[in-house]
Amino acid sequence: MTTPPATSASALIATLQRAQQARNLVVAGMLTSHRCPWCVALRKEQLDPRMRTSQAPQLMVVEFDVDDTAPIQFPDGKQRTARAWGEAYGMTLTPTVTMLDRMAKPLAPPLVGYGSRDFYGAYLEEQIRIAHGYWQSRHNDTP
């Protein structure tokens, strides 16, 4: 299965619905900014390669651009900006990556910044493992 590069937050609901239907898919939210060089490096060095691998579970990334003031539709029916979404969960710095549940809420403490390239992959895999457990339990609860 080939996964496309990170998607815009405008596709948040569709991405979360896809994860609910799939057995081996997790969704990460990335708080980003077009002015953030570390965001570009993180995406290029960590997220894009992980999204393109055949390693299970598959990773999809939804980018929440804090510079975009357009409202985003969330699964709870409310609209808010990417910045407001991040602030609601204490995420104000870019880049920040967090695994998402079906309501676009963080499943674990987020990965903030990108200072440790050597260890980031291991931290990301731990987050993916946590998210995979969440999504697997959601599938086990459905008939």
Image (spheres, rainbow, N blue to C red):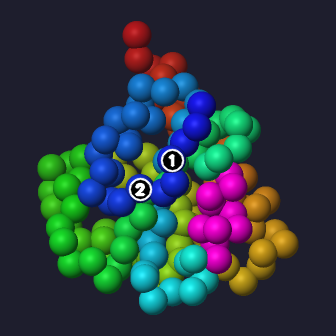
Establish if 50 lies above or below 55. Answer: below
Q: How many marks?
A: 2
Give x and y (percent) for residue 12. 32, 51
Q: Is residue 1 magenta?
A: no
* Residue 115 quadrant: bottom right
Residue 58 place in picture, x, y as percent: 61, 39
Residue type at the position of mark 1:
Pro
Res. 7 visible in picture = yes
Q: Position of residue 98 (x, y in %)?
A: 52, 61
Q: Which residue is pictured at 62% across the width and 58% down the height?
A: 48
Residue 49 inside the magenta-drawn segment: yes
Observer-nearest of 2 and 97: 2
Q: Residues within 10 Å of mark 1 (few under 14, many from 20)?
A: few
Left or right position of 104 against 140: left
Residue positioned 58% across, 46% down in the render: 59
Q: In what element is the residue under mark 2? A: strand
CB contact under 8 Å: marks 2 and 1: yes
Magenta region, main secondary structure: helix
13 over 19 or under it: above or below: below
| Residue bearing the label numbered 2 | 7
Label 2 Cα crowd, 10 Å radius (few <14 / some 14-19 / many 20+): some
Disc 2/disc 1 C-alpha distance (Å): 8 Å
**According to the image, label 1 marks what residue?**
4
**Which residue is drawn at the image coordinates 48% and 66% (left, top)?**
30
User: Where residue 101 sits in the image (x, y, percent)?
Assistant: 43, 46
Report the span colored magenta: 41-50
What's under tag 2, amino acid-wise? Thr
22 left or right, relative to 13: right
Dividing the image into 4 quarters, which one contains the N terminus?
top right
